[in-house]
Amino acid sequence: MAEKLTHAQFAERIAYMASQCAQWAGSCLTLPEKVNELMTPGAVKRFLEEMQARLDYLREDLAALEPRDER
């Protein structure tokens, strides 16, 4: 977990997420005979879990940036 999140680090994290989304989209469209088939619930769940893990990582970065209430 980073103490400070720079613009470059944030850009790196979200660029990685975008690349992962693009890979998933590309995989879904690779075989022309499958483009109109329904997605399996397991595949959608794997995608959501992967993206959620990345978002959780960003939330940890955000928590480190937010001031703590020192009482």
Image: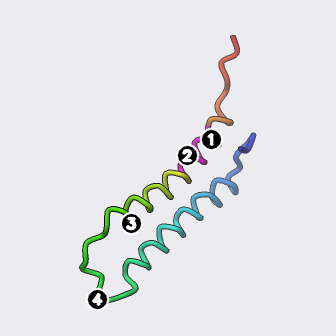
Category of crowding for the residue at label 4, using alpha-carbon neighbours closer than 10 angstroms: few (below 14), some (14–19), many (at least 20): few
Find disc 3 in the rendering and name its residue: 43
The image quadrant where one finds the N terminus is: top right
Q: Which mark is residue 56?
A: 2
Q: Is 58 colored magenta in this rendering?
A: yes
Category of crowding for the residue at label 3, using alpha-carbon neighbours closer than 10 angstroms: few (below 14), some (14–19), many (at least 20): few
The answer for how far apart the CA atoms under marks 3 and 1 are is 26 Å
Residue at left 48%, top 72%? 22
Judged from the image, the secondary structure of the residue bearing numbered disc 3 is helix
Q: Is residue 36 above or below residue 17?
A: below
| Amino acid type assigned to the residue bearing label 3 in the image | Ala
Find disc 4 in the rendering and name its residue: 33
The answer for how far apart the CA atoms under marks 2 and 4 are is 35 Å
Image: magenta residue range: 55-62
Left or right: residue 54 compared with residue 32? right
Determine whether label 2 and label 1 are within 8 Å by CB. Answer: yes
